[in-house]
């Protein structure tokens, strides 16, 4: 069973930094793309940042220049470095991966369980 396990969330003051990690299980044939999404209370889930196998990245306008997505392919791990955090960044952050579990599997989207990020003084 494919698993995506996030870590690194917590409480931080405005202007502070956090680094989120997402570890994918080893029973995966290939990963096409990975990304971070977030969902604030009462809001829809939105894209924060994503990266594909060719190294391209996309960021939400609200986090450009403050957040950096990176991926360690050898470790099947995705990171999100978040700097200059603002109260409006408060949300549950979810890891997402588009992958094939075996060589004959269809491409599917998987989600982690989410990690809470709270930015407050």
Image (cartoon, grey):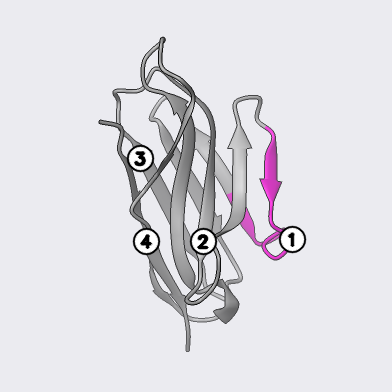
**Residue 20 drawn at (x, y percent):** 43, 54
Crowding near the residue tagged with mark 1, few <14, some 14–19, many ≥20 C-alpha atoms within 10 Å: few
Magenta residues? Answer: 56-68
In this orientation, which residue lies closer to the viewer: 93 or 76?
Answer: 93
- The N terminus - image quarter: top left
Q: Which residue is mark 4?
A: 115
The residues tagged by marks 3 and 4 sit, at their Cα atoms, a distance apart of 13 Å
Q: Which mark is residue 96?
A: none
The residues tagged by marks 1 and 3 sit, at their Cα atoms, a distance apart of 26 Å
Mark 1 or mark 3: whose residue is earlier in sequence: 3
Q: Which residue is mark 3?
A: 23
- Identify which residue is drawn at 60% across, 54% down: 47
- Identify which residue is drawn at 33% across, 53% down: 113
**Residue 38 drawn at (x, y percent):** 51, 61
Residue 121 appears left or right of 33: left
- Identify which residue is drawn at 47% across, 76% down: 41
Crowding near the residue tagged with mark 4, few <14, some 14–19, many ≥20 C-alpha atoms within 10 Å: many
Do labels 1 and 4 touch, CB within 8 Å? Answer: no
Indicate the secondary structure of the residue bearing disc 3: strand
The residues tagged by marks 2 and 3 sit, at their Cα atoms, a distance apart of 17 Å
Above or below residue 93? Residue 49 is: above
Counting every numbered tag in the picture gives 4
Q: Which residue is mark 1?
A: 61
Mark 2 or mark 3: whose residue is earlier in sequence: 3
Residue 86 appears left or right of 31: right
Do labels 3 and 4 touch, CB within 8 Å? Answer: no
């Amino acid at each position: 069973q494919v698993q995506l396990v996030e870590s690194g969330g917590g409480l931080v003051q405005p202007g502070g930094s956090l680094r989120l990690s997402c570890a994918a299980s080893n029973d995966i044939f290939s990963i096409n793309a990975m990304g971070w999404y977030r969902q604030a209370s009462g809001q829809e889930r939105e894209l924060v940042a994503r990266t594909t196998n060719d190294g391209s990245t996309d960021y939400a306008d609200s986090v450009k220049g403050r957040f950096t997505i990176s991926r360690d392919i050898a470790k099947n791990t995705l990171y999100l470095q978040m700097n200059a955090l603002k109260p409006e960044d408060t949300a549950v952050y979810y890891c997402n991966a588009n992958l094939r579990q075996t060589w004959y599997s269809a491409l599917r989207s998987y989600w982690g369980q989410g990690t809470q990020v709270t930015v407050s003084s």
